[in-house]
Image (cartoon, grey):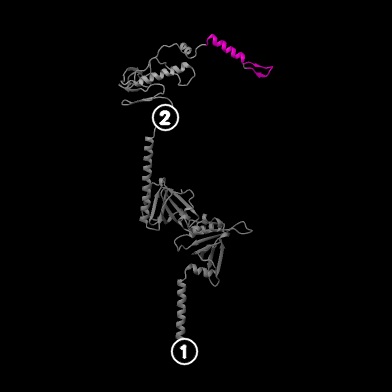
């Protein structure tokens, strides 16, 4: 009885141990299993079944590929031997992508000119190639830690909006951020995970799982935002931004697709409306802005209205055009309204209004002022009809005048007594050079 009991207990214990091991193995992920087999301290970020080709043939001893923060590892468990290989990321010179989604690692060797090439073919159990991830880790290992903002690693660690917008150097400071979405961007080789920002005037894309890349789209260059039709090879639930000239941005949002599309269209419509309003305001300002003043005095006339300009030396005169001036004619009938008859005794070219010590100038100025005052006191305007061209105001008629008499009046000749006095003054003001002093009197 006891042996049977012991046997039953031992059998039940072995069954429980095997079941616990199976539960542990089932709960353990592929990354944890590869880490335990590789006997390393770093966590495995990505693992995949693969075939490794180091020469002309595939090396079947390595069938598992893994990536850590600082290295790329290979593991093989054929026959009794366990094969482990670790390649530090710093020792890799270049990563190449092939058309069949395979990846080549080029590692230089010491004392040999030809580098060693690791050609990796993946099983694609994750439905994708880890080329972008290898490239990002390789670039991150080569970056200076003091300049982490230029790599995608810092965006993983601190994916705040302020930190992400730092990468857009030319973004205006007064630009308001309206929406932000986590999205997947369709690239040339692979689909990249990123962030999309919607501001007042532009759309910003920022990839965070590859080498740092940013893209800026101005709303003024966007022609249309639409939803893509379901086609083979396209992103599911993708949104198309048409820029014209066969330039289309394709992305899919992890958030609600309808909400993202609606917000994008709303931002585009509001920007277009604001742009139209600004153009209308500019047109109104141009039409209402006053014209630049001209240097010469001109008279502008229309069939319904006449607005001549004033000259400071002639009396204010307004004219009405009774009949429109025919094309090519030099004369027309003009009527002077609201002004007295012009003085015909005034010279053709008025004298400058300057102060002078001569009595004749003062008398002339006083006479002119009196005439102007008398003209202003007249209450009844008189109308006179004269024949003048439309481009010149009504001027007084010319009078034959002897300009020699006018010059004699302004500058009279000296009398004999004045000539004698001037000569005496000149003689008294001569300087005696022997005495070296001035004897005025």
Does the magenta-highlighted stretch encompass residue 433?
yes
The N terminus - image quarter: bottom left
Q: Which residues are magenta?
A: 414-439
Per the model, the C-alpha gap separating discs 2 and 1 is: 124 Å
On screen, residue 128 above or below 312 = below
Outermost residue toward the right in this view? 434
Q: Which residue is mark 1?
A: 3
Identified at 44% across, 17% down, the residue is 363
Residue 35 position within the rendered picture, expressed as x and y whole percent measured from the top left? 52, 68
Q: Which mark, by number, is residue 97?
A: none
Viewer-nearest of discs 2 and 1: 2
First-in-chain label (2 vs 1): 1
Of helix, strand and loop, which one carries label 1? helix
Residue 388 position within the rendered picture, expressed as x and y whole percent measured from the top left? 35, 18
Can see residue 191? no
On screen, residue 62 above or below 186 = below
Q: Which residue is mark 2?
A: 293
On screen, residue 8 above or below 371 = below
Location of residue 424 by image quarter:
top right
Residue 166 position within the rendered picture, expressed as x and y whole percent measured from the top left? 49, 53
């Amino acid at each position: 009885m006891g042996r049977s009991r012991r046997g039953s207990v031992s059998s039940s214990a072995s069954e429980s141990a095997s079941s616990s091991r199976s539960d542990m193995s089932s709960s353990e992920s592929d990354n944890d299993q590869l880490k335990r087999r590789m006997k390393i301290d770093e966590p495995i970020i990505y693992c995949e079944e693969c075939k490794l080709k180091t020469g002309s043939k595939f090396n079947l001893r390595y069938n598992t590929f893994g990536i850590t923060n600082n290295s790329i590892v290979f593991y093989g468990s054929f026959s009794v031997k366990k094969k482990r290989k670790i390649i530090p990321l710093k020792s890799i010179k270049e990563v190449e992508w092939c058309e069949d989604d395979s990846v080549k690692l080029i590692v230089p060797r010491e004392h040999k000119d030809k580098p060693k090439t690791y050609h990796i073919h993946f099983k694609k159990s994750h439905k994708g190639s880890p080329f972008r991830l290898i490239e990002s880790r390789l670039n991150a290992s080569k970056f200076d830690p003091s300049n982490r903002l230029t790599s995608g690693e810092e965006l993983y660690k601190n994916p705040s909006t302020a930190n992400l917008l730092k990468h857009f150097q030319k973004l205006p400071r007064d630009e308001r951020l309206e929406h932000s979405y986590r999205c997947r961007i369709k690239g040339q080789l692979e689909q990249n995970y990123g962030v999309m920002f919607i501001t007042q005037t532009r759309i910003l894309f920022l990839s965070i799982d590859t080498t740092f890349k940013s893209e800026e789209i101005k709303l003024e260059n966007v022609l249309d935002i639409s939803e893509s039709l379901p086609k083979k090879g396209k992103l599911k639930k993708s949104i198309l931004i048409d820029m014209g000239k066969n330039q289309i941005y394709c992305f899919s949002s992890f958030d609600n697709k309808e909400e993202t599309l609606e917000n994008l269209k709303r931002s585009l419509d509001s920007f277009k409306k604001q742009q139209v309003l600004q153009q209308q305001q500019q047109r109104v300002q141009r039409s209402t802005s006053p014209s630049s003043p001209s240097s010469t005095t001109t008279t502008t006339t229309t069939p319904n209205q006449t607005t001549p300009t004033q000259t400071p030396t002639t009396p204010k005169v307004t004219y009405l055009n009774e009949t429109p001036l025919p094309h090519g004619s030099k004369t027309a009938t003009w009527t002077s309204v609201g002004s007295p008859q012009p003085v015909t005794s005034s010279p053709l070219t008025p004298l400058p209004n300057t102060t002078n010590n001569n009595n004749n100038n003062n008398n002339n100025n006083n006479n002119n002022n009196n005439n102007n005052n008398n003209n202003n006191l007249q209450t009844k305007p008189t109308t006179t009809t004269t024949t003048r061209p439309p481009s010149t105001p009504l001027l007084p008629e010319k009078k034959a005048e002897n300009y020699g008499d006018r010059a004699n009046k302004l500058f009279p000749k000296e009398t004999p007594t004045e000539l004698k006095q001037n000569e005496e003054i000149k003689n008294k003001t001569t300087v005696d050079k022997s005495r070296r002093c001035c004897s005025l009197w």
